[in-house]
Image (cartoon, helix red, strand yellow):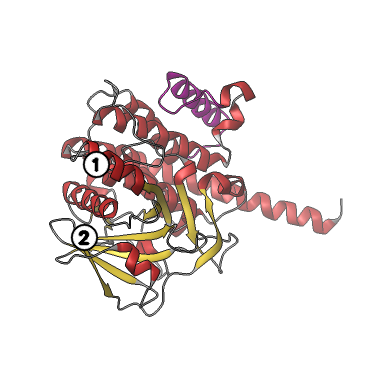
Amino acid sequence: MKKNRVKDALERLELCTGRIDAWTSRADKLQDETPQSRLKLKFSASLGTIQENATKVHGAISRNWCNDNPVHTACLLLEQRLVRSKKRKRPLQETSSNLVAQATCFGLSLRGDCKAPSQWFDSEIRIDQFSSSLCKVIRQPQNPFVVFCLNENGHLKSRPSLKETAAAYAQQSLSLEALLPRFQTKLPLEEVYGLAITLVASMFQLSHTPWLETKWSKKNIMFARANSKMSLTVDLRYPSLVKEFDRGALLQTSTLNPTSQLIQKSGARTQRPDDTSTNRTCSNLLALAIMLLEISSGRPIEQRLGDDQIMNILPTDQSGLQLAEAWLREEKAHGRLSCAFSRAILTCLQEYLNPDADFGDEQYCNAFKEKALLPLEEEMEYLVFGPLR
């Protein structure tokens, strides 16, 4: 072996050894930390307020599409809305996570049959005091970016934004499912952890809203904003939850049942006895655990199934829980899972079985935050910015 190759190998070995020593030192410090010495993490408003506003936004969207073209799609920007303690001065970055999103403001990308299918319309909805229609605005926009104001009755009105330009969108949006293979490469740690934190934080904010009334998964987590500075064509800092609104089905059902609010493109479904708020929350917790496993490994869960199983496996099935548990044990046994990811995934799996899981309960939310959200935040802080001084 040539001297240069030996020298390079020794340098890489020294670098890896240094990282292991640093992680070991940090792990020892974490064991000695008191609750008072840990990072402080809270949401920008009460979860009840955020959930209530997200529900209002969903209701306003479902009522304000045009009737001529029934199929419309909305991508809700998933935002952390976390207020972090100021123990550490982070370097200034152009990232959405540095600005704490207001509880009254929700980012949306809109698309419908009444506009070219390939084009997304960038917008915000703010809880305010006006009324109007969505489709008229996206067909003939006066500005590249529009703010929609939402009043207490669920009515919308557009107004120009102070933003000079709208967000740049990639030529083709990509789902988390399509991006998973790229997680096996060396993506920036801040992006990987930031995405995981955003998904966990979104579980708090949306669990009691219509946005998560059906299961979420890697298939409906979408990335559409362009990213010219990093290796991906889309920006991982801006995940969105995609939901389709079938206006035709809504109108048909409203004729039969005036109290109906929303019918998804998949069609109306009869509510089963087990289709309760608690069961939907537990189902989404299991789906979240699976997404965190997929993000940390860079592999979809389908790779662990035979062809005959892929169509039968559902995140709410007992077999899905068993599959996730086996995968978690395997990743930990081979040292492929960090401590924080392991804790967050294990917490989600445990809470899937908890009949009292309720993100409307403040005490439950605080306990879940301590076990799932805070470890990810602390581990990211250490790996990206170094140990606390």
314 on left or right of 249: right
- Indicate the position of residue 210 as horizontal and vertical percent values: 28, 42
Residue under the image location 30 percent in, 41 percent down:
252
Q: Nearer the viewer, residue 353 or 318?
A: 318
Q: Which residues are magenta?
A: 311-338
Q: What SS does tag 1 mark?
A: helix
Q: Nearer the viewer, residue 272 or 47?
A: 272
Residue under the image location 39 percent in, 68 percent down:
139
Residue 323: within the magenta?
A: yes
36 is higher (above) or lower (below) than 385: above
- Indicate the position of residue 201 as horizontal and vertical percent values: 32, 47
Identify the mark nearer the N-term, 1 or 2.
2
- Indicate the position of residue 3 as horizontal and vertical percent values: 83, 57
* Amino acid type at mark 2: Thr
* Amino acid type at mark 1: Ser
Q: Nearer the viewer, residue 336 or 65?
A: 65
| Residue 180 shows up from this direction | yes
313 on left or right of 308: left
Q: Disc 1 marks which residue?
A: 254
Q: What SS does tag 2 mark?
A: loop
275 is higher (above) or lower (below) than 155: above
Q: Quadrant of residue 369?
A: top left
**Mark 2 and mark 1 in contact (Cβ < 8 Å)?**
no
Q: Quadrant of residue 381?
A: bottom left
